[in-house]
Structures are given as C-alpha cells and as structure tokens.
Amino acid sequence: MSKGNKDAYVVKFVERNGQKSDLARQAHKAIVELQSEKYVQTLDEEATLELDHNDKSLFVFSDFTSNAFKHCRRLGCRIVSPLVVLFCLQKQRCVPKAEQPVYSMAMADVTVSCTNLDKEARSEVMDLVQLMGGRVYRDLNVSVTHLVAGEVGSKKYLVAASLGKPILLPSWVKACWEKSQAR
C-alpha cells in the first residue's frame, strides 16, 4: 500500500465537544513523537458519525459510551482507549488487533474460558475480558490461563483444577474491571 493511498494506516483520535481528555492528549503526543504527524488525525464526534465504512484506521476513544463510539463499533472499526495506546507504547507492545473495542490492558496476557454460567453472565464476563485486552475461548484448551466458573463440578472445572489453572468467580472479572477504571 502506498503512502498516498487514502486507506493508509492512520490513528484517529475522536474528540468530544472539541476536547481531548488528559490521557488522550498524552497518547496523541506520544504517537506524534514516534511517527509522522501526517498519520495522526483528530476527528470530532459529528465527523465520526458521518463515516459510512470501516476505513481500517485505529480509532482512539476516551468515551466508550458516546454515539460516535457506538457508530464506529457497528462499522467494525478497530477501537482502543488512550490507556491502551499509552500501555502499548510504554511496554513496547503492539496495539491489540481485537475485533472488539479494547479499553484497558488489565488482562493483556489473560485467556479465559467459562463454565456453569447463564447466558447473560457468560456474555458479561466475555465482554469485560475483551474490553480489558484479554481473550476468551469457549473450550478449555492449553491457551486458557483462567477458568471463570459459576459453580463447582463441571467437566471443565475438574480438568482446570487437575491442570492447576486458577478457577475464579465472575465477580473476579468485575472486580478487575472496576480496578482498571480507577486510574
């Protein structure tokens, strides 16, 4: 892909009411120090709402509740928060290529499987793990680092226990999420 191509890889910071959060300002400054400013853009929410396709850019949102965020998520855009950008630059890691938005890297090296959870609880656990940069597998496999269990005794539970995998309640994931918010 040539640098003149309109689909060149660009980092797009989305501002709310013409304002960047302190973390977004820090992340923007850090990125500009590493690469040409020509590949870093700032969009306001109105311009973001006018997007009609996923342009393969990296979108940086401070607010994961805004209409612009929801619009980009529906389009399948790659979305992270300034926390993720700063973490990845600081730790010299690649920004995750997740299909879901990533808000923090609190579970960057965590892979979770679930057992004995109702559909709603399983969905909440999976969403939170992915928001924190973790991965989720339906099956218990060698990549799984933690099992989240609603109760004792399932086949997955017994296998995870025999392998010495940490087995935790869904409240552990929620507590990690709450802790990751207090920055």
Image (spheres, helix red, strand yellow):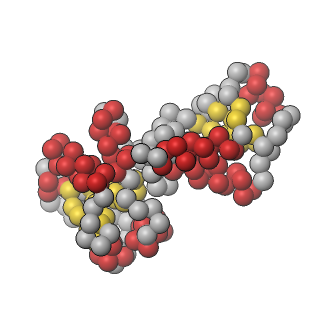
Query: Compared to 167, does 73 lie above or below?
Result: below
The front one of 64 and 95 is 64
Q: Quadrant of residue 43?
A: bottom left
Q: Residue furthest right?
A: 153
Q: Residue 59, position in %: x, y?
A: 34, 59
Is residue 139 found left or right of 134 in the rendered image? right
Q: Residue 75, position in %: x, y?
A: 44, 68
Residue 98: tell me if it is visible. Answer: no
Is residue 24 found left or right of 147 in the rendered image? left
Q: Quadrant of residue 163?
A: top right
- Residue lying at 57% horizontally and 50% vertically, measured from the top left: 128
The front one of 180 and 28 is 180
- Residue lying at 38% horizontally and 46% vertically, measured from the top left: 84
- Residue lying at 25% horizontally and 70% vertically, measured from the top left: 18
- Residue lying at 15% horizontally and 44% vertically, measured from the top left: 33
Residue 145: tell me if it is visible. Answer: yes
